[in-house]
């Protein structure tokens, strides 16, 4: 699948530069790390392994480029963002193929959903920037003028489950705001970030505005978030890493945005459209369960639990697991051997504690884990409380609305929740009481980029999306002028 050239590999027929992108130039490192494809475990190539020196160079490049980019008129910045969106669309097939080889998510999802969304991220924030009005008001004859000033170089740290989508969800608003960025992609899926650097350069983004430092979290990632030249940190990833990053941010008082894990519930009431509820539940195996928003806890009202489980089991058995490049595949591999071991550890411990695997419950070949549904699980058990980040769901029953809400809210997370009910009044009552950044009623994963996105409790700090992203990347200033 790959072949090593100096700094270049070929993945799915696409040439990818494996070096950093700093100040508009490729930069190598003395050390490398190996990037594996989850499809078959093969090595895709050796990737530059950055550390303090590369981070210092990238932050310096971002600092040098900042005054020019910040001073670029809004229309000029918006035009470059739109040119990047076009570049993404032009190379959509290549980006989709490389992302699938690198992180194992379905090619058809990358083609039809993820990569179009990557382009949309840039267009959306270009439009946002141009539609930004003025906030002017009067205080006893004094004129207040609020302005959105660019904040400076930003550190962006992203996970492997939706690499380019999540990176551009941060890059686009930061660039729109007039900031410059240093991106440290996840080491298990570093490739499309490198292609994005090529696309951005071809689109006319000035050197140093977007920098990509490849490497490991504890090395390049840690050096980046500790850097005093960084004015914003935006992180998407796990809770333990977020705690480390927050400690680094505290040293420099760097404002930070954290999008973290979840253990979201799907509440199925007896009055729900059962076909829809089963569809929503089966959808949680998307991306082999490696979705932060996944509703991994199925909470089903007792009278319909047996019928729900029967229909769910039938549907789950029909899922096609296999090569994510095949159109017919529903569930692909998990990202890395370590992740598969982690998933299996959760399932083994749950089974030992008395859980029953109604569906799956074991490894498949290679990095494939069987879609799994566990019942007979206790509310305070590890499998109900901790994020697995694999194709593993639990099913619990409830008898009253009160109990459903209590169980739904009873974890330390609060990222999302989904409610299936045929009763609008019930939907209103229940959603009002759910602790979650996003609540879906009789639907799942419907996203509008204007909406706030993020988590409550340990699922995050702050919100992304529309005004929330844009404001985060700006230093807001109020100027008061006497009459
Ligand atoms: P992770 O925390 O292990 O790694 C995320 C990124 O942080 C990687 O780029 C990694 O290299 C970097 N990193 C690791 N240690 C670091 C350090 N000390 N300093 C700076 N950077 C460091 O998370 P992961 O396993 O890649 O991603 C899975 C997690 O991400 C899950 O918990 C999932 O729920 C969460 N996630 C959340 C969202 C959301 O929007 N809320 C979206 C996707 C994934």
Image (cartoon, grey):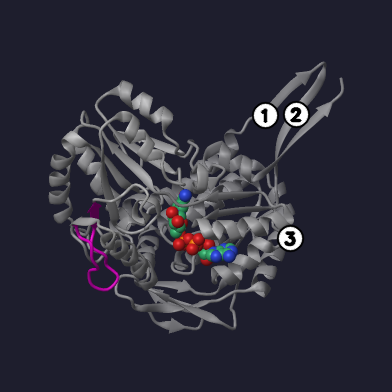
Q: Nearer the viewer, residue 248 or 287?
A: 248
Majority secondary structure of magenta residues: loop
Check the picture and name the quadrant holding the N terminus. bottom left
Alpha-carbon neighbours of circle 2 within 10 Å: few (<14), some, or many (≥20)?
Answer: some
Q: Is residue 216 visible?
A: yes
Q: Secondary structure at mark 1?
A: loop
- Residue 145 shows which numbered tag? 2
- Mark 2 C-beta to ligand 1 under 8 Å: no
Q: Position of residue 387 (x, y in %)?
A: 40, 55
Mark nearer the N terminus (1 vs 3): 1
Q: Is residue 358 magenta?
A: no
Alpha-carbon neighbours of circle 3 within 10 Å: few (<14), some, or many (≥20)?
Answer: some
The correct choice, above or below, for 59 with respect to 257 in the image is: below
Region in magenta: 359-375
Q: Nearer the viewer, residue 258 or 464?
A: 258
Mark nearer the N terminus (2 vs 3): 2
Gap in angstroms between the C-alphas marked 2 and 3 = 30 Å
Q: Is residue 155 visible?
A: no
Q: Residue at x 82, y 16 (%)?
A: 140
Mark 1 — residue? 134
The correct choice, above or below, for 117 with respect to 63 in the image is: above
The correct choice, above or below, for 1 with respect to 255 in the image is: below
Judge from the rendering whether residue 447 lies leftward or rightward of residue 134; answer left or right.
left
Mark 3 — residue? 228
**Residues under numbered marks 1 and 2 in contact, where contact means CB atoms less than 8 Å apart:** yes
Q: Residue at x 50, y 66 (%)?
A: 194
Count up the numbered dots.
Answer: 3
User: For the view shown, which residue lies furthest in the right direction?
Assistant: 482
Check the picture and name the quadrant holding the C terminus. top right
């Amino acid at each position: 699948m790959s072949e090593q050239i100096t700094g270049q590999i070929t993945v799915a027929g696409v040439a990818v530069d494996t070096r950093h992108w700093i100040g508009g130039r490729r930069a190598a490192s003395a050390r490398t790390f190996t990037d594996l494809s989850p499809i078959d475990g093969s090595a895709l190539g050796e990737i530059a392994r950055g550390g303090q020196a590369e981070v210092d160079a990238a932050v310096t490049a971002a600092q040098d480029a900042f005054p020019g980019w910040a001073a670029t008129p809004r229309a000029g910045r918006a035009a470059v963002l739109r040119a990047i969106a076009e570049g993404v669309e032009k190379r959509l097939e290549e980006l989709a193929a490389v992302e699938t080889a690198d992180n194992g998510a379905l090619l058809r999802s990358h083609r039809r959903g993820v990569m179009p969304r990557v382009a949309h991220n840039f267009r959306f924030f270009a439009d946002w920037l141009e539609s930004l009005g003025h906030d002017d008001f009067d205080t006893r004859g004094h004129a207040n003028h609020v302005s959105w000033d660019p904040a400076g170089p930003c550190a962006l740290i992203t996970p492997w489950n939706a690499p380019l989508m999540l990176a551009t969800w941060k890059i686009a608003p930061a660039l729109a705001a007039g900031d410059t960025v240093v991106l440290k992609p996840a080491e298990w899926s570093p490739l499309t970030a490198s292609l994005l650097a090529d696309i951005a350069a071809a689109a006319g983004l000035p050197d140093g505005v977007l920098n990509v430092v490849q490497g490991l979290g504890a090395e390049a990632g840690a050096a980046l978030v500790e850097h005093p030249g960084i004015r914003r940190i935006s992180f998407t990833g796990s809770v333990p890493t977020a705690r480390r990053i927050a400690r680094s941010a505290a040293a420099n008082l760097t404002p930070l945005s954290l999008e973290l894990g979840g253990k979201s519930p799907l509440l199925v009431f007896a009055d729900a459209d059962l076909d829809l509820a089963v569809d929503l539940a089966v959808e949680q195996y998307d991306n082999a369960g490696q979705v932060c928003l996944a509703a991994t806890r199925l909470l089903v009202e007792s009278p319909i639990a047996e019928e729900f489980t029967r229909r769910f089991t039938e549907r789950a058995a029909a899922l096609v697991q296999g090569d994510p490049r095949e159109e017919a595949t529903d569930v692909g591999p998990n990202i890395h051997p370590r992740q598969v071991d982690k998933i299996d550890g959760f399932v083994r411990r749950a089974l030992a504690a008395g859980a029953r695997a109604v569906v799956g419950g074991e490894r498949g070949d290679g990095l494939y884990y069987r879609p799994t549904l566990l019942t007979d699980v206790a509310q305070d058990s590890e499998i109900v409380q901790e994020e697995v980040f694999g194709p593993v769901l639990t099913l619990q029953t409830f008898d009253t609305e009160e109990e459903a809400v209590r169980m739904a809210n009873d974890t330390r997370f609060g990222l999302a929740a989904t409610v299936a009910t045929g009763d609008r009044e019930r939907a209103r009552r229940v959603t009002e009481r759910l602790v979650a950044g996003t609540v879906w009623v009789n639907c799942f994963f419907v996203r509008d980029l204007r909406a706030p996105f993020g988590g409550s409790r340990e699922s995050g700090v702050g919100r992304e999306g529309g005004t929330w992203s844009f404001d985060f990347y700006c230093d807001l200033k109020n100027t008061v002028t006497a009459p």
